[in-house]
Image (cartoon, rainbow, N blue to C red):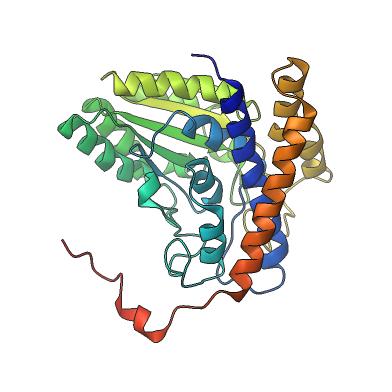
Amino acid sequence: MQLSREDLLLAYRRMRRIRDFEDRVHVEFATGELPGFVHLYAGEEASAVGVCMNLTDEDMIASTHRGHGHCLAKDTDATGMMLELYGRKDGICGGKGGSMHIADLSKGMMGANGIVGGGPPLICGAALTAKTLGTGNVAVAFTGDGGSNQGTTFEALNFAAVLKLPAIFVFENNGYAETTASQWSVACKDIVNRAAAFGMPGVSVDGTDFFAVWSAAREAVERARGGGGPTLMEVKVPRFYGHFEGDAETYRADGEVAALKRDHDCLKIFRGRVTEAGLLSNADLDTVDAEVAAEIEAAVALAKVSPLPGPEDLVTDVYVRY
């Protein structure tokens, strides 16, 4: 399958939306108006979009504490997300989830998760459901390099392999588990090497290259849908901001982030690839940039004036009624 012009524009729009959303949240959080903790995804856009471009709304994903990018890659409404981060009643989760627990089941986004390595066991449930009911759907867990060391992650990998579940485990290795370098904390050189221990295919890709991620994810998704079982993907990505907003980042070398932004920006790389190949023009991409910028500006303006949840909202969404 080849990506069409429309596919390329959609991929760029989603990556640009993530970048602009995160950059704006970085600015707005500094004002003190956003409640709770915030962990930004900027720099990792090609990973989420490259994977999720191969999925449907019926395919499920589980995220991490750094979940905005995964939501937006799964086509969750950016305005509803911005309202949610502001804790507003009309937010995507009624203002009750905030950044670290944002979710959108209508898009197959099972939720961000404050538990490190919390996603892999969840997607085993979704994948087991898909296999049992024969829906042909798949489930994807996005996990960081820190989550790759969790015992529940190993159990999930083994469980998925034993039952040949339609599951894909995406480890986004941005080099740091909070402030701990993965090159020190992960015994094997590459996380992808762990796939062999569970008898499943493993692939490592450059997370700044949308096309490499998209291609690897497509193969994994086709394998899963066809009954071939799970895949482990290690996507090596840069992280443009700290672990959380307010992180002093004293553990990073001088000039490290500037070099990442200069040489390893997935949006710049994508723009260069498609314009040099004549697939899209700079004018095409500039139009997307302007439209997304206006979208994010409008979302912030609305979020600042939207109503907060009321006392009556305390007793809703507590239990599920079947």
On screen, 301 above or below 267? below
Residue in front for this viewpoint, 118 or 139: 139
Say if residue 191 shows up in the picture.
no
Say if residue 40 shows up in the picture.
yes
Residue 23: horizontal and vertical position, in percent? Answer: 70, 53
The number of callouts visible is 0
Q: Quadrant of residue 183?
A: top right
Residue in front for this viewpoint, 113 or 176: 113
Residue 16: horizontal and vertical position, in percent? Answer: 66, 41
Q: Which residue is pictured at 28% across the width and 26% down the height?
A: 161
On screen, 27 above or below 61? below
Q: Which residue is pictured at 57% across the width and 61% down the height?
A: 82
On screen, 25 above or below 68? below
Relative side of 294 to 110, left or right: right
Q: Quadrant of residue 306?
A: bottom right
Residue in front for this viewpoint, 116 or 110: 110
